[in-house]
Amino acid sequence: MNRVLATNRDRPPVGFNVWRSAGIAWQIAQALVVFAALGWLVWRGIDAMDYRWQWFRVEPFFYREIDGEIIWGPLVRGLILTIQISAIAGALAIVIGFLTALARLSGSFAGRVLAKAYLEAIRNTPLLVQLFLVYFVLAPIIGIERFWAGVLCLALYEGSFAAEIIRGGLRGIDRGQYEAADAVGLTAWDKYRYIIVPQSMPLILPPLTGLLISTIKHSAIVSVIALVELTTQGLNLVSNTFMAFEVWFIVAGIYLALTVSLSFAVSLLEHYLSKPKR
């Protein structure tokens, strides 16, 4: 009898699911109305400009087939370079962020001072100025190409923000976890690898995802050092074809597809990490 009563208490009230479904349907309807209104405003604005759409001309922007061979178009080439720059810079930014966060949390006075100086210097100067310094000053000294100069600048910039995200996640773990790891004799590496970092990942992943998305968007700035990524290819196409609306709609859609795919992949990773480990 007690088990039956407990089961009945756990059940939602009668009609709860109906009200919940109605609420979800109402939210979806509101979103559709908002998107429809925005679409109507955009359409009215474009219609007032008397713009003549030329979507039939966009296929060569992606690829052409010549004698049975596929030649990739400028947007695909720009997309590939954007992915390369963003992926390498994002990975380096995470590494730099972890090292900087550990330096700020360490007991070394010199490490904390160096980490703090790096953060203040990077976060308080414009990204464009940093890119010029890396490309025109640092790159000739250490002998790196413009691709790696752009990647290094993005990694240093995003790494400064990643450091604070990671430091906040590590400090969000209860102090008792650190003391327990020290009590069982774990080394600093094993302590962070097996105890601290796995517990801090749910705190770190969401803001870190935003940082990686920001890296994709900030990759457009490397165009100023003659790296022809996606945005630069878009500019070139607009200047050659005068199809501003078509080109920028496509470029925006490609960036949106990249960032949404990244967010979805990280959501799957978060779901996997949230599962109880046996």
Image (cartoon, helix red, strand yellow):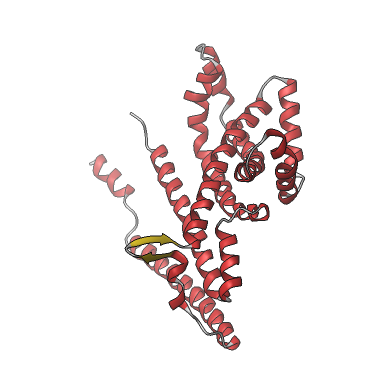
Quarter of the rendering containing residue 243:
bottom right
Query: Where does residue 90 sit, x and y in percent of width and height?
Result: 55, 42
Relative depth, front residue between 106 and 23: 106
Relative depth, front residue between 251 and 21: 251
Quarter of the rendering containing residue 233:
bottom right
Q: Is residue 217 above or below residue 193?
A: below
Find the residue positioned furthest to the front: 67
Rendered residue at 71%/49% (across/down)? 127
Query: Where does residue 107 sit, x and y in percent of width and height?
Result: 69, 19
Q: How many marks?
A: 0
Of the 4 image quadrants, the one containing the C terminus is top left
Q: Is residue 26 above or below residue 262?
A: below
Query: Where does residue 43 sit, x and y in percent of width and height?
Result: 53, 82
Rendered residue at 56%/30% (across/down)? 173
Query: Where does residue 259 sit, x and y in percent of width and height?
Result: 50, 55
Question: In the visual, does 35 lie left or right of 108?
Answer: left
Rendered residue at 43%/70% (across/down)? 59
Of the 4 image quadrants, the one containing the N terminus is top left
Quarter of the rendering containing residue 62:
bottom left
Q: Is residue 188 above or below residue 196?
A: above
Question: In the visual, does 221 lie left or right of 7?
Answer: right
Relative depth, front residue between 23 and 196: 196
Relative depth, front residue between 165 and 90: 90
Rendered residue at 68%/55% (across/down)? 224
